[in-house]
Amino acid sequence: MRDLTRRRFIGQGTLAAGAGLGLSGHSGLAATDAEVPRKGNRPWPYPPAYDRETEVDVDVVVLGGGVSGCWAAIAAARRGLKVALVEKGNPVRSGSNGAGVEQWQDCAGNPASRVTPAELATDIIAARRGYVCGISRWIKTHEGWDRLQELEKMGLKIRDDEDEFKGAEFRDEQSKLLFSMNYQDRTVVRIWGTGLKPALARKCRRLGVKIFDRVMATSLLSEDGRPGRRIVGATGVNTRTGEFLIFRAKATLLAAAAPGRVWQYVDNLGLSCGSPPNNSGDGFAMAWKAGAMFTLMEASSGRGAQPSIGVLRPPGRNPTWHPCTIVDANGKEIPYVDVNGNVVPTVSQRCYPAPGQRRYLGGGHLMPAPEYNGPHLLPDRKIEEEVRSGRFVLPLYGDLPSMPELERKVIFRMMSANEGLGAIGYYTLLKSGFDPDKDMLQAYGSPPTPNVRSVRMDMGGLVVDWNLRTNLEGLYAAGEQAYGTWGCAGSSTSGHWAGQRAAEYAATASTAPVNRRQVEDEKRRVYGPLRQGSGMLWKELENGIAKVMQDYCGDVKHEKGLEIAKRWLAEIDDSELKRLRARTPHELMHSLEVANILCVSQLVVESCMARKASSNLLGFLRSDYPSVDPPEWHRFVTVRLEQGAVAVGELPIDHGAPLAEGYARHGG
């Protein structure tokens, strides 16, 4: 053990002090009625326009202005088509990567990569035992470097041009690219990504994309107004004025984020999730009601609830901090171990495969297929055992000062400053006097609330084909909307690919009329909360939905509990949801979000009931079906609404194969 008496320990109390994390847009709203809305003691600053209706005719409408949505709009606009981008926030900073990104993963096409795109995609699919979208993964590994070079032309910094890290083990001296996680394969590129979204938004405007910001998409419009038919556009509502918008389009592309608020509305945390709190599953809800097919909605990433704004993500399991040294309160080092369970003795060796191991994927992460595990800290259960025995003493700390200078510098000064979830905390620490050359950062956190581990669905989504088209004609999906697709690079490549294919379809498709009855029905639904003179507000209802999901669709599932959840959610849909009250356009947006969360919860419960087997690969445990990953259930279970009833189906685990031929045949 080393002498730690001269070191300061920085814990989470430092982050809380002066962090300035107020969410004024999410609380404190008050109004007497819908006609004279107010915010606090002040009049609502935007004139209400609930009676205004605007029609927009375009070739392609993209719903969601995050990374995938911006790339989709760019790709479609380059084909010379009229494109509308609909975003609930502002595309300059909206989406899961709105504040920045520090890594570009699975970039096998970069000039320093020692793995081919095909090899990497094949291994990723194998490491997930097939439970991933092989189509989008193949696109990602083959086109990630192309998109990254485009971003460089847009002004994003992706190379160490100033030679700040010259001579570092993770630097390629010829290309000046920096790599993380795996220094042998060199497929994860470190980037200065805080300017990512502004660059994409500027490109959209230069290409003439019509951006509708502060507009929440509320529904998909079907041909003849019937679910299951061709999608001919969408509706939306302005979250500042309440204006209703109708988008008529030849092709519609869903690019909203995966749901982030299904289980984890915790009383003492409020909107607490591992992604931006406005990620409420809007696209999932719209597609489900329109008759689109979903898969892997029963899968869970098993992450505990954590605040998602203004917090520097702690060292430990966070890939941004790999391979940071972790010590206990007495300075005793928590060992890293390799795939064989052997202690990894040096910082450098934490970024290389174990002796005899061909390749590993991800640093610090445990893959579903153990042979792809990279060097990682002791598993949580082992650390807990050591704490209980007294060998380790809490709290734990990220020991930056003991690390090699360039490793320490790249983790804190470069990666943490550009990672979206950590940027605010990074600057707060610096302002508080934190010095990574001298100080340690507490690896804080606590076990998740019971039954609340399933806090982010980053595996499930819409079933897509090689055009990233759903089972509904005219409807495409990209980014987290497509099953088994996630990450900034995956959103970029799938968004660009889907935008191109949607544009190709729109170039030859005819414009279908919008069914007026469907529009009027949607307007009545959207404005329903404004007509309520009394009733509950959105927070109360969201808390209730989360409680149902925690109690009856938590970590350990059973048919009886799922049946109770299904019944409760149906009753909420039929009763409490109809009494939801909103007093301003902003509260109206939150009310509609909660309606979508309810819809997604029902979709999740149906998916959980459809899989009659437990699966470690999917983080899915059913006590009434204890057999884990039986071969007969090694497949995708699909669900969709068909004439008001849930239709359950299946797809082979190699959906989209053969991948090389499919990629080449569809323009790769």
Image: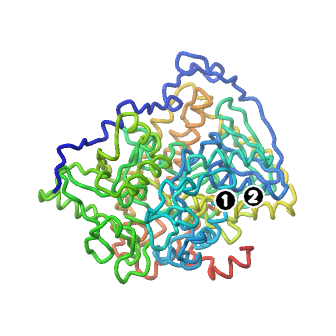
Which amino acid type corresponds to the residue marked 2 in the rendered image? Ala
Decide: is 389 above or below 421. Answer: below
Of the pair 277 and 590, the residue shown nearer to us: 277
In the rendering, at what x and y percent does residue 256 appear? 61, 51
Circle 2 packing at 10 Å, graded few (<14), some (14-19), many (20+), is: many
In the rendering, at what x and y percent does residue 305 appear? 38, 48
Identify the image quadrant of the N terminus.
bottom left
Task: Give the CA distance from mark 1 to mark 2.
Answer: 8 Å
Counting residues from the N terminus, which is met first, the one under dot 1 or under dot 2?
Answer: 2
**Left or right of residue 386: residue 283:** right
Which amino acid type corresponds to the residue marked 1 in the rendered image? Gly
Q: Is residue 434 visible?
A: yes
Of the pair 566 and 474, the residue shown nearer to us: 474
Decide: is 525 above or below 358. Answer: above
**Residue occupying the far top of the picture:** 41
Labels 1 & 2 near each other (Cβ < 8 A): yes
Residue on which disc 2 sits: 75
**Left or right of residue 317: residue 499:** right
Circle 1 packing at 10 Å, graded few (<14), some (14-19), many (20+), is: many
Q: Is residue 515 visible?
A: no
Decide: is 264 above or below 653. Answer: above
Residue drawn at (20%, 43%) of the image? 6
Determine the secondary structure under disc 2. helix
Decide: is 101 above or below 37. Answer: below
In the rendering, at what x and y percent does residue 55 appear? 81, 40
Identify the image quadrant of the C terminus.
bottom right
Q: Quadrant of residue 658?
A: bottom right
Residue on which disc 1 sits: 495
